[in-house]
Image (spheres, coloured by chain):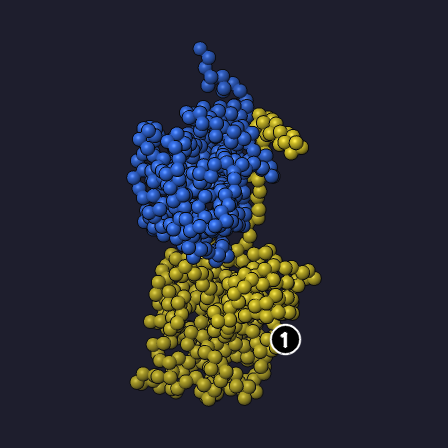
Amino acid sequence: MLSSLRALKRDLAAIATTLGASRPSPVVQTTRPVPARAHRRLRVASIVRETADAVTLVLEDPAGAPIRFSPGQFFTLVVPLEGEVIKRAYSASSSAADGQRVAVTIKRTPDGRVSKYLVEKARAGDSFEVLGPSGSFTPVPATHERLLVLVGGGSGITPLLSITRTLLATEPATRIALVYGNRAREDVIFWDALESLATTHGPRFRIRHVLEQPSAGWADPAGRLDGEALARELDALGEPDGPTTDYFLCGPEPMMRAARACLEGRGVAAARVHQESFAAAHASAASAPTSPQLVTVLIRGDQKQFVVAPPRTVLETALDAGIDMPFSCTVGGCGTCRVRLVEGHVAMEEPNCLTADERTQGYVLACVARPASPCTFEVP
Amino acid sequence: MLDLDKLAHMLPPRVRNALDAQIEALGVLTEIRDPRVLASLAPSGVRGLLLHRGKQGVPTRIRASHYAHFDWTYPTDFPEMRMLYDRAKSGQWDSASLPWSTDVDPMNPEIPIAPDYFLDFSALEGMGVTLDARERLQLSHSIIAWMLSQFLHGEQGALFAAAQVTEAVQFFDGKLYGATQVMDEGRHVEVFHRYVTEKLGKLYQINDNLFVIIDALMSDGRWDMKFLGMQIMVEGLALGAFGTIYRGTKEPLLRQLLKMVIQDEARHVHYGVLALREHITKSLSEKERCEREDWAFEVALLMRNRFLMYELYEEWFEGRITRAQWRELVLGSPGLREFRDVMFTRLMPNLREIGLLSPRIVPHYERAELMKYSAGAAANELTGEQMISDLDRVA
């Protein structure tokens, strides 16, 4: 009876408002659209075919907005492929001083679906969702005289070229020496660009190529860029190590391991050796949890709870729940989303950028972590 | 002689519009020829069109009057429905798998969310309203938000109706299938709500005519009327609307979302055709069949003529053009024509298949220029993949 009276009252009010001047707004709710995790859509302005296996995509904002990054940083491309959305990180190879465009260079790898697609199918005019920039493999800007020694292997040259281009253009007191290892001459991704920089900047930029399988007539030393070869090349550069010299390593893990050992043997402080790992995390189906788990996040003195359902990650679910967790690359490459696992077990995509020390201290990366049991995380 | 138009123009615009709305609402009811259909639709028409029950705030209560049909022997009584149930189980998808990280910007002209032909801007200028480029983008944002809001409200109706239908249907295999449809509809509510609120940031009131249809099928106690209303008419309407947006949008998240939803909807209509073909052709008297046939015709007309986006008119153009001008503008837009084409291409063959397109009703459909759509394949002859493939081909 009471509900009927209430309904009648509402009906009469509806008739009155229809005839009167106070009709309610046709819009019942406005919400602030959720920022899509700092994604932006960038358009491929042009494509440069570097080698048979590598292309450079020059990206720009369709609306002309600037693109800012630091040399050595990378961007995460979100690529829809065969019904999946796959994220891959690629380093910028262009100068950060440009401001309007960024070039990322992609080398096709034998099992790389995304790299194969981008190298073979990407066209000018395509556009992609892009995250970033991410990463801390970047020199601290300086005005004093200094030397940067860059050691690269294969496609590891990409961030090193961005560092070279940027610093040669913006830091007149910085000198750069590059030792670059490849299998053969035709595998060298930026041969012409490097030669051109060496010609333009003379003694401020020196380059030493190390080829495993040089063609006939190759005058320089041949062989793999291992510790012995690096020591030989550093000697040949004739640049004594000093407190203003920093080393940046990027390439295959065996090469970087050998380079670290070589530098340690030469007395270089570990703090002056910087490295970038190129191994992108990938899901391991065998260890992926299959059931939803309750997750508690301790953040800034607050406690939040949500359920993570496979195959989602802790970070994806937390962001969807409106929790402002730190993140950047979302592919396990930058460490921005590092959180401490207080309780529970997670399966993480490997490899990722966590160090052995961080693992020992109980840190995990929220962007590639999936809970295998109820978990509690603490955001530093 | 009394000139009603002239008289109406002497009224204040707000009163004139209110009068126009009431006259239009009465027009809907007086156009219904069959008294049984009128008796069935009129209460819903009054609640939706005159009392605006869908816009009175939370909650909206609709009384259900159907019987739940139990069977303690659990028969395997409809193999085709059992097959559809198996297909529905394997066709379940996770809403979280959609690319929600996509950055959707309704104001980005390079990636339009809706095709720009839902309103004829030159015709609008002819009525004295000129919009600059930014205003056009804002209006396009409102249009897509309105449409997706109606999809969302329709999906809420579908969720509850699917639950009712699962209770009421007389085939046990149909009940099992119905459970998957309830899950489907819940997922659709989730994804449309998320898209509307997270990506578009704007939720509109339910359209009065959509409310009438939902109210009618929810409150009708006959299970086959619920099927006819929900599985054939509303799902057919949904397929038309989804297909039109799917064809026209350049926004990748919405396109992927609609692709998944359309494939579910195709199963839903198929279910309706299976259940009703059996029931209408074998169990109903001719008198009862005629009532369903007339009901479907009236609702088809309601769907063809009445989804006129008045909520957008009130937000954007009230006081600048008349309701009648707005009606003329929307009815003449290429987008609405395409919407009708896709909708009736799906709907008419289904009505034929379930036995509601007999020679007695054909002349009425011919007068309404809808018979040209009746020759296509019905839902039981089409898979969701084929529907998507058809839409992709003409996109």
Assess disc 1: are there few (<14), some (14-19) or many (≥20) residues with their C-alpha within 10 Å of its C-alpha.
few
Residue at the spot of label 1: A361
The residue most toward the top is: B1
Q: Is residue B311 above or below residue B31?
A: below
The C terminus of chain A - image quarter? bottom right
Please tell me which residue is depicted at 34% across the width and 48% down the height of the picture: B382
Of B29 and A164, which appears nearest the observer? B29
Please tell me which residue is depicted at 60% across the width and 37% down the height of the picture: B57
Helix, strand or loop status at disc 1: loop
Chain that is coloured blue in the picture: B
Three-letter amino acid code of the residue under disc 1: Gln
The answer to whether residue A65 is visible is no
Chain that is coloured yellow in the picture: A
Please tell me which residue is depicted at 51% across the width and 63% down the height of the picture: A311
Q: Is residue B365 left or right of residue B113?
A: left
Q: Quadrant of residue A113?
A: bottom left
Q: Is residue A301 left or right of residue B1?
A: right
Q: Quadrant of residue B91?
A: bottom left
Coordinates of residue B378 in the picture (x, y in percent): 34, 43
